[in-house]
Each structure stands twice: as C-alpha cells, then as structure tokens.
Image (tube, rainbow, N blue to C red):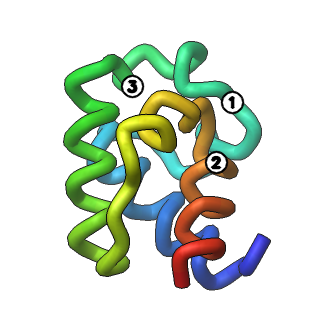
Amino acid sequence: MNDQLGSKITSLVADMLNIEPSSLSSQLRSQIANWDSLRHMELILRLEEEFQVRFSSKEVAEIKSLEDFVQMIEAKS
C-alpha cells in the first residue's frame, strides 16, 4: 500500500465515520458500526471527488475494507 495514499484515505474515511483512524486498520466494513450502506455510498462519492476517479457498480459492491479502497484508487491513479 502506498503509505501516503493510505493515510489520506484513512483520514477521510475516519472523519466521515466519526471514528478514530486507528480503528480502521484491518477491519472489514461489516465490523464497523457506522459504515452502513448509506455511508458506504457517501464514502464512494467523497473518494471519487477527492481522487478524481470513478468506481463501477461492481467495484462498489466489492469494497469490503479500507484496503480495498486504497488498492482500487492506486490502480486507477
């Protein structure tokens, strides 16, 4: 993982979920109470805007963790 990219994504996601960034390290989205389907779509839109990328509907469904966001954004950059 690109550390700088990972840190930026972690910070954005933690801010939107109102949680500490350290609690996102290896958890799946299903393990994070604030990360529901509505918040998931808000995260998608925010990250698309921030990093000037677009996620397909298939990719949106495949994102299960913070690491998934990082890998997909790295691949699109």
Estimate the x, y position of residue 3 in percent, counting from the top left.
Answer: 72, 78
Label 1 sits on residue: 27
Asked which secondary structure carries label 1, the reply is loop
In the picture, measured across the screen, residue 67 lies left or right of residue 72, that is right
Q: Residues within 10 Å of mark 2 (few under 14, many from 20)?
A: some
Q: Earlier in the sequence, mark 2 or mark 3?
A: 3
Residue located at (42% from left, 49% from top): 14
Q: Is residue 57 above or below residue 47?
A: above
Estimate the x, y position of residue 46 in percent, counting from the top left.
Answer: 23, 59
Q: Amino acid at mark 1?
A: Gln
Label 2 sits on residue: 68
User: For the residues marked 2 and 3, what is the alpha-carbon distance in whole angstroms?
Assistant: 14 Å
Report the label total: 3
Asked which secondary structure carries label 2, the reply is helix
Front-lying residue, 75 or 22: 75
Q: Is residue 55 above or below residue 4?
A: above
Q: Amino acid at mark 3?
A: Trp
